[in-house]
Image (tube, grey):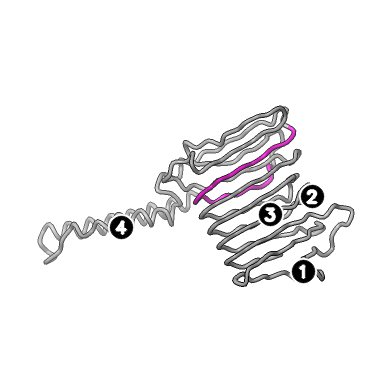
Amino acid sequence: MRARSSRGINLLAFLALAAGVLLLLSNFLLLSDFNATTLWPLLLVIGGVIILFQGDITDANQVRTFGITRGTVESGTLEISAGEIDVQVHDLAREGRLAAGQYAADSRPALDLSDTHAMLRMKRSATPWLSFGDWDVGLAKDLPWDVYVSTSLGQVSVDLSGVIVRQVVLASGIGDIRMTAPREAFEPLMLRSATGDLHVYTPTGNRTIIRVQASTFAGIHADVNRYTQSEDGDYVARNADYGLEPVEIYVSGTFGEIYLA
């Protein structure tokens, strides 16, 4: 994040310097027929450059970290409505915590407790609209999770290989979804992207069955070394541990490519 911030600041300084030189030349009448007020679109250019190189119009240092102790919690739900923010979800290496990660300043995740169940919510509506810092959430590995993530314009990257999964729904309007399948899951997993690529990764040994519903505008690319296609069109993971219950994954895409690896 610091590298992106540095590039954004350096380019911003260059643009400001260029604008200053032009204004000075105009003031000293060294540029004929030059109207300084025509430079106002440069403000839009500067704002766009900062977003591209720094990831935010606000200071990147305003991203905050959080950590929640597990306590007596025995199950959890993560609900993310991200809007235009990129999201990463993965297992939590440190034991004793329920969840930990980072979020944009002034938009701390909301936590609700009901008996031994925890509900963790992260909503774009609770985030300053000029803030686009990525959300990163690590989940405890020793309790079952329901995971619901949706974005309208953003990338979703979810690694569930070390997480106990009960139910998962990942959806994106415009943006890619990348998911690493869990070893076990209580319910089928649902992935849906209207416009964007879908990537599903199955770790070696996992017993995964992927059912693809693709439109005529979506291509399917399955690694033949990792999957066998059954007669009904499902993609079944090779070299699976048949002592495990199968993990069913439903993948649906309209525009974009679907990759199974």
Measured as percent of width and height from the top left, residue 52 is found at 43, 57
Q: Earlier in the sequence, mark 1 or mark 3?
A: 3
Q: Considering depth in this image, is 113 or 51 the residue closer to the camera?
A: 113
Q: Residue 15 carries which label?
A: 4
Real-space Cα separation, disc 1 to disc 3, in angstroms = 17 Å
Compared with 193, 217 (above or below) is below
Element class at badge 3: strand
Q: Are there few (<14), some (14-19), or many (20+) residues within 10 Å of tag 4?
A: some
Magenta highlight range: 74-92
* Left or right: 188 as drawn, with respect to 88: right
Badge 1 is on which residue? 233
Between circles 4 and 2, the one closer to the viewer is 2
Residue that appears at 62% across and 31% down = 112
Precedes in sequence: disc 1 or disc 4? 4
Please state which amino acid type lies under the numbered disc 4: Leu
- Give the residue at mark 3: 190
Q: Mark 2 points at which residue?
A: 184
Q: Earlier in the sequence, mark 4 or mark 3?
A: 4
Assign a secondary structure to mark 4. Answer: helix
Inspect the image, locate mark 3, and give the three-letter code of the amino acid beneath it: Met
Main secondary-structure element of the magenta-colored stretch: strand
Left or right of residue 120: residue 5: left
Does dot 2 land on a helix, a strand or a loop? loop
Looking at the image, is mark 2 or mark 1 earlier in the sequence? 2
- Could you tell me how far apart the alpha carbons at marks 4 and 2 are, in whole angstroms? 52 Å
